[in-house]
Structure formats: C-alpha cells, structure tokens
Amino acid sequence: MLKAYLEAGRIVRPHGVRGEVVLEPWADSPAFLLRFKRFFFDEGKRDAGLLSAREHKGRLLLRLQGVDTVEQAETLRGKVLYIAREDAQLPEGRYFLQDLVGLEARDVRTGQVYGVVEEVLPGVANDVYRIRGANGEEYLFPAVEEMIARTALEEGIIELLPIPGIFDDQGVDA
C-alpha cells in the first residue's frame, strides 16, 4: 500500500537569525520541492505551516509559521518534513524511491524471485537497487530502463531483465 505522505527532506540547521531553516531535499532537485505549498511533520500528522520557500546552494530555505527566531529554528534540527502524495505529480514511468523499497524483485522471463529491494543507491550514471535475497545474499542491480521490464507498485513487484552474472553468484560481500 502506498503511503499518503512521503519524506521530502531533513531540516539540517537554522539559517540566519529570523527563524529560517535549511532543508536537505530528498528529491531529484530542490526545484521539485518548490512546487509544494504544504509540508508536514510527524509522517503527515501535523502541518508545518509553510510561509515561504526558496532555493539556496542546492538546498531549500524555509520559513515556517511560529518559527521567528534562531532558537525556535534550532529546535527543528533533524526533523523530517513530508509532502502529501496527493500534491505530487510525477511523469509516467517515474517513481518515488520510497515506493520502490520493499518491492519483490523477479525475473520477467522466468518468474524467479530474486529478493526484495532494500535500498535505492544514487549513482552517477544511474541508480542502483540493493536487493536482499531470501537467504540474506545481497545483489546490486543497475536501475537502467533496458533492464526493468515493469514496475507495479500496486502489486508490490518489479520485474527485471537481468544480464547474465548479476544473480548467478551468491551476491556481493556486504
């Protein structure tokens, strides 16, 4: 089941003396998060009261309601902000990384289950899926379009077209 609220990033520190906070975005770019008019605390349970947002050095500077001093901003250090899934629009074929974690990875040709996607590691050329097999073995799978046949979030599966050698051994040393 897809979560109604998604992690947007972590508040890393105050900025200035008037209560602004610096958000480390957990998105492809800070510009993606600038589209949102609402952020939430506590996995979506409490509105953060967004007053303004702007990009600054690859991060976001946020003004939140009721946060007017550096001391108030300091109390938010380390807190995770969330966005509402209903506020997000992704192009077809694009997914939130959080939705990929937990998918069962299987071979589209044979139906063989390789394991579960445990993590999506960002890469320079492409992301890499860390897949944990039933016996604890770990596989690193390149997330390239040519090797992913279908992603079915509703079904909880990702169907792969692996090249020889990726799943033939006992995984990689952790």
Image (spheres, rainbow, N blue to C red):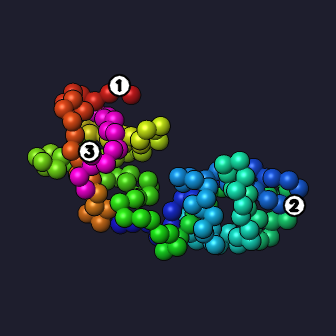
* Residue depicted at x 29% and y 57%: 151
Q: Quadrant of the C terminus?
A: top left
Q: Which residue is mark 3?
A: 147
| Marker disc for residue 173 | 1
Q: Secondary structure at mark 2?
A: loop
Camera sees residue 157: no
Q: Residues within 10 Å of mark 3 (few under 14, many from 20)?
A: some
Furthest toward the left, the residue is 110
* Residue depicted at x 51% and y 62%: 6
Residue 39 is inside the magenta segment: no
* Residue depicted at x 60% and y 62%: 33
- Amino acid type at circle 3 is Met
Nearer to us of marks 2 and 1 is: 2
Q: Position of residue 10 (x, y in %)?
A: 63, 53
Q: Which residue is mark 2?
A: 18
Residue 48 sits in quarter: bottom right
* Residue depicted at x 18% and y 32%: 164
Q: Is residue 122 left or right of residue 51?
A: left
Extent of the magenta region = 137-150
Camera sees residue 54: yes
- Amino acid type at circle 1 is Asp
Residue 144 is inside the magenta segment: yes
- Amino acid type at circle 2 is Arg
Tag 3 or tag 1, which sits nearer the N-term? 3
Query: In the rendered image of this protein, does residue 10 appear above or below residue 35?
Result: above
